[in-house]
Amino acid sequence: MTQKSIFRSAILLSGFMFFTKGLGLVKQISFAAIGGASAQTDTFFVACGVVEQLCMILFSALSVSLLPIYTQKLVQNGRGAANQLINAVLRVCLPLALLLAIVCYIFAPFVSEFFSPRGAEADYVVSLTYYLRLMSVAFLLWGYFLTVNVILEAEKIFIPGRSQGFFQNLFLIVALVFFFRAKGVVSLVYAFLLSGLIECILVTYCVRKYFFIVWGKITSYKPVWLLLRLAFPLMLGNAMFEINDIVDKKLATMLGTGNVSFLTYGGSINEIITTLIISSVSTVLFAHFSTLAAENQREKIGEILSKAVVALSLSVLPFMIICLTIGRELVYCLYGRGAFGTFAVEQTVAVVMGYSVGFIFNMARSNLVRVFYAFQNTSFPMANGIITVLCNISLSILLSHFLGIGGIALATSLSLGIATLLLLIKVKVYLPGFSLLKDKSEYIKGIIAALAAASGSYILQFFLIENSYIRFMIIAVEIIVIYLFVLYVLRSKVLADFLSHISRFKILRRFH
């Protein structure tokens, strides 16, 4: 295992996620133009969000906890024992998924009442209940593919497990363009479920070389009970974060119809950065951290983590500057057409700016928490999540009164800052030599480059460019060019390392 292999995996996954998120942008643009920010879009975003959040609480926790256990079993006991483990987990996980689907079906009316805006018509509650009940099938789909995908991640095969977003975006675009006007939100619900089914088929096909179903008796369920013991604190931690998201949606509904959609549209732009740059790298690092933890190579983990954090920090800074300085142009270019009016643009801009403040915090937390998971410690991340969410809920309630929907997004960013600080203090239990101060010169260079890029952005905005698309493209390119140029002049090691990794491209060799 080398840093080169990590870099290659991260680049390949980021490239795929870039394509997927590009398709996701087309989906959100279609949503904004065709559906706008209405009661219809609110019901779909709430139903989809609630189901995905519950799946994340349960099955994502099981998947994250399962990877280091599976990796350890594979390294120490071989393929047969690891295969037995996955079969045992499926025999526990799928009945649990079915039970959760039944619970969701039964309690859908109560959930719909909770998420209904003030003064909402009875049709809103009835429709939301119907959509939630249809989507309850997704629990079985998520439970299966997240469990089986652990095998692929242990083999350092990442793209199949991240394909659900691709299928979901593609099918939702087709449903919006061809069926939404005639069939309404129900067409989107079926598109959502179909994407989950296709993902299950894909993961099953890709894992065929490493996994086979055991039809007889499982030798031992002891690793499953260990998994549940490790996953339970993580489930509680995930529950806290999902409860926080639920509170955000509830506060958004209290601000009036359409605000859930504003929060979702702005959050989509935030997800482009967090998924493309942060999540893809974190996914790759976690698989490698799990292997290194099983081999007790703590210094290696600390070295990789340190380089990843500084590299990702410098990577997200220019996007943070773009969101803060030309966020309005960004939102207008993406959504400002059709049913999406000026007021909707302004509200979404506030959300984008609020989330952008937390880009670096989000990045740091996503990678730091993987160290705890790799060492099979899920208790501290749970406590970290509870503290962070309590702060987030308090800040959301407070800031939404003064800043509206943008205050909810800002509260999320500030709470991530608290989470990051707590994780940095505790991570030294596993990585005694780890310190961000080792790369302080790189952080300083990044800040100087970001300030220079922001200054250039403000100067360009004094020039009147009427076309919003041209205005955005010119200023965005200027920000990135100035940022990279200043880093190059300051001899940033992160930039030099990046160029060295891609030095096989002749056009870049002159920079070395």
Image (tube, rainbow, N blue to C red):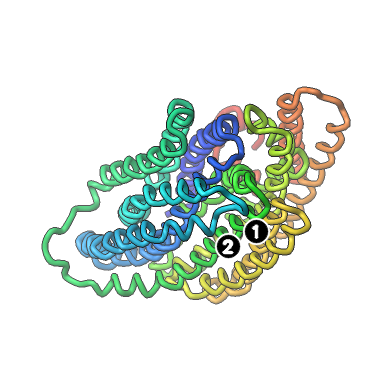
> Residue 335 in the image: x percent, y percent?
64, 33
Q: Residue at x 45, y 53 (%)?
A: 52
Q: In what element is the residue under mark 1?
A: helix
Residue bearing the label numbered 1: 412
Q: Position of residue 204 (x, y in %)?
A: 27, 46
Please, which residue is most extreme toward the front here? 122
Question: Is residue 175 something one can see in this rendering?
Answer: yes
In the rendered image, the quadrant that contains the N terminus is bottom left
Please say if 263 is above or below 394.
above
As drawn, 182 above or below 101? above
Residue type, mark 2 in image: Asn
Mark 2 or mark 1, which is nearer to you? 2
Query: In the image as oriented, which residue stretches furthest toward the left?
Result: 216
According to the picture, the residue beneath numbered tag 2 turns out to be: 244
| Callout 2–callout 1 Cβ contact below 8 Å | yes
Is the residue marked by circle 2 packed among few (<14), some (14-19), or many (20+) residues within 10 Å? many
Which residue is drawn at the image coordinates 73% and 34% (left, top)? 342
Name the image quarter holding residue 305.
Answer: bottom right
Compared with 509, 395 (above or below) is: below
Of residue 145 and residue 248, the one placed in the foreground of this image is 248
Residue at (47%, 70%) from the top-left corner?
236
Q: Within 10 angstroms of label 1, few (less than 14), some, or many (20 or more) residues?
A: many
Q: Position of residue 106 (x, y in %)?
A: 37, 60
Q: Nearer the viewer, residue 150 or 414?
A: 414
Q: Give amino acid for label 1.
A: Thr
Is 252 left, or right, of 162 in this rendering? right
On the image, the x and y values in percent for residue 448 come to 79, 49
Observer-nearest of 245 and 187: 187
